[in-house]
Amino acid sequence: MKLLLALMLFMTFFAHAADPEPGSQYLQAAEAGDRRAQYFLADSWLSYGDLNKAEYWAQKAADSGDADACALLAQIKIT
């Protein structure tokens, strides 16, 4: 039982360390202008609770014509 608990704690340590901040896997593409990456990054920040970063990336994606980002931006603005 102790071994199982130790293994579970060990696994959660590495799972958390793999993604230091929400949406980090999308950041490079978003900064390069990929509107879907911008949308996914905005959605990640919204899920994390950072409305300022979520709004920033949603606005960039919406300005590029991403319809999902427009809806997400509206959701952020009424929150």
Image: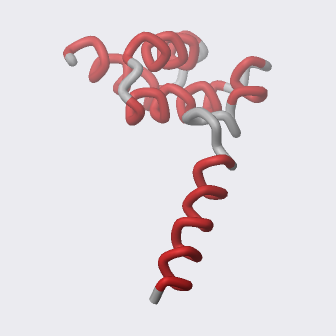
Which quadrant holds the C terminus? top left
Q: In this view, does 78 lie to the left or right of 68?
A: left
Query: Residue at the location (47% across, 28% down)?
Result: 45
Question: Front-most of 51 and 72?
Answer: 51
Which quadrant holds the N terminus? bottom left
Q: In this view, does 37 lie to the left or right of 68?
A: right
Question: Front-most of 25 and 30?
Answer: 25
Question: Front-most of 2 and 46?
Answer: 2
Question: Front-most of 20 and 54?
Answer: 20
Q: Is residue 53 left or right of residue 75?
A: right
Query: Residue at the location (49% across, 35% down)?
Result: 44
Query: Residue at the location (48% across, 77% down)?
Result: 5
The quadrant in which residue 6 appears is bottom right
The quadrant in which residue 33 appears is top right
Count of picture labels: 0
Q: Position of residue 36 (x, y in %)?
A: 61, 33
Q: Where is residue 42 in the image (x, y as percent from the top left)?
A: 50, 26
Tell which residue pokes out farthest to the left in this image.
Answer: 78
Q: Position of residue 20 (x, y in %)?
A: 64, 37
